[in-house]
Each structure stands twice: as C-alpha cells, then as structure tokens.
Image: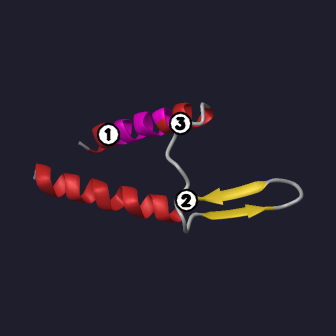
C-alpha cells in the first residue's frame, strides 16, 4: 500500500510539473512564500501544501 501511495504521489507531482510548465498548474495562493533575489527565486507553497493536505485528509476519511 505504501509503495502504491508513493507511485500515486510521484505521478501527481509529474502531472503538476507538466501543467505548471504550460502555465495551467496550481495557482499561487496568498501566503505562499516567494523570495526573489539577484541570482534566483525561491518559491515555497506553504498554503498550497496545507490546502492539499486538508483535501487529501478529507478524501481519505471519506473513503475509509
């Protein structure tokens, strides 16, 4: 079960990466950290991670 869940997460991450490249991915939510510097940009989607976690937790609870 753990391996199956890992494969699902890898596929989900690949799909998000694929659609993000086209500009159609998950939008940036208010509260996501974006630090832009001279040599690059750091993006950490903390609020997006929380929202995804809550949605997946509710989904798992419903499927249980």
Say what secondary structure mark 2 lies in. loop
- Residue at left 49%, top 46%? 26
Question: Residue lying furthest right in this view?
Answer: 38
In depth, the one of 14 and 24 nearer the eye is: 24
Residue 6 locus on image (x, y percent): 36, 42
Q: Mark 1 points at which residue?
A: 3
Badge 3 marks a residue whose secondary structure is loop
CB under 8 Å between discs 3 and 1? no
- Closer to the N terminus: mark 2 or mark 1? 1
Residue 14 horizontal/vertical position (percent) = 49, 34
Task: Say which label, 3 or 2, has the lower sequence index.
Answer: 3
The image's mark for residue 24 is 3
Instruction: Indicate which disc, 3 or 1, sits on the residue closer to the N terminus.
Output: 1
Q: Magenta includes 9?
A: yes
- At x 21% / y 52%, what residue is drawn? 59
State yes or no: discs 2 and 1 in contact (Cβ < 8 Å). no
Q: Give the range drawn in magenta.
A: 6-15
């Amino acid at each position: 079960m753990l391996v199956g869940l890992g494969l699902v997460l890898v596929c989900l991450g690949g799909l998000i990466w694929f659609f993000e490249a086209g500009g159609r991915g998950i939008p940036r939510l208010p509260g996501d950290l974006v630090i832009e510097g001279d040599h690059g940009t750091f993006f950490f989607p903390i609020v997006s991670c929380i929202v995804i976690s809550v949605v997946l937790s509710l989904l798992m609870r419903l499927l249980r």
